[in-house]
Amino acid sequence: MFIEIKTNSSVPIYLQLAHQLIEGIVRGELKPGDSLPSVRAFASDLGMNMHTVNKAYHYLEEKEFIQIVAKSGVFIHPNGISQASEIEKQQLKEQMRPLLAEGLVLKLSEEEMVKMLHELVQDIKEGKP
């Protein structure tokens, strides 16, 4: 799986890493039970600080996408990713709301925004940046 970090992005590096791992799960490149590199090895491979990788891993663990097992490693959640709860759906809606409001201020139609959403879903599934 190819990881691309954009250093000039406003998105923190740990979130860029976490989001790309999530996209790898979506595409099936990372399957339940697959192991991820150790924090030290991943940081070395990516040329980044170990604390950044550790922060990304803990972000993913908090969302129950991965399991961190002491002295064993880091794994894509072995039971697979559960379907979103109502709370998780509400959290996603709250995160999307400001973006949609910004689109409306910029005079994007609902249809244009829905089209953009569909394009993004396809891009994620196909591994396009």
Image (tube, grey):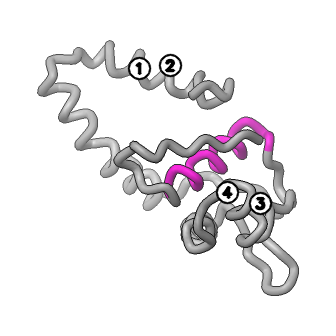
Q: Is residue 19 magenta?
A: yes
Residue 91 shows in this picture: yes
Q: Is 77 or 7 nearer to us in this picture?
A: 7
Q: Amino acid at mark 1?
A: Met
Q: Which element type, helix, strand or loop, lies under badge 3?
A: strand
Could you tell me which residue is drawn at 52 percent across and 50 percent down?
16
User: Is residue 103 left or right of 77 when viewed as pictured?
Assistant: left
Q: Tag 1: Cα neighbours inside 10 Å, few (<14), some, or many (≥20)? A: few
Could you tell me which residue is drawn at 38 percent across and 56 percent down?
91
Q: Tag 2: Cα neighbours inside 10 Å, few (<14), some, or many (≥20)? A: few
User: Is residue 2 left or right of 112 when viewed as pictured?
Assistant: right
Residue 28 occupies which quadrant of the picture?
top right
* 50 over 98 or under it: above or below: below
Could you tell me which residue is drawn at 23 percent across and 43 percent down?
98
Residue position for label 4:
82
Q: Which element type, helix, strand or loop, lies under badge 1?
A: helix
Q: Tag 4: Cα neighbours inside 10 Å, few (<14), some, or many (≥20)? A: few
Residue position for label 3:
76
* 115 over 2 or under it: above or below: above
Q: Are marks 1 and 3 in contact (CB under 8 Å)?
A: no
Residue position for label 1:
116
Could you tell me which residue is drawn at 80 percent across and 41 percent down?
29
Q: Earlier in the sequence, mark 1 or mark 3?
A: 3
Q: Which element type, helix, strand or loop, lies under badge 4?
A: loop
Closest to the camera, between mark 4 and mark 3, is: 3
Residue position for label 2:
119
- Image x and y of residue 31, in percent: 82, 49
Using the numbered discs, state the Cα–Cα distance from disc 4 to disc 3 in whole angstroms: 12 Å
User: Is residue 44 left or right of 7 when viewed as pictured?
Assistant: right
Q: Are marks 1 and 2 in contact (CB under 8 Å)?
A: yes
Q: Is 74 or 80 nearer to us in this picture?
A: 74
- Image x and y of residue 32, in percent: 82, 55
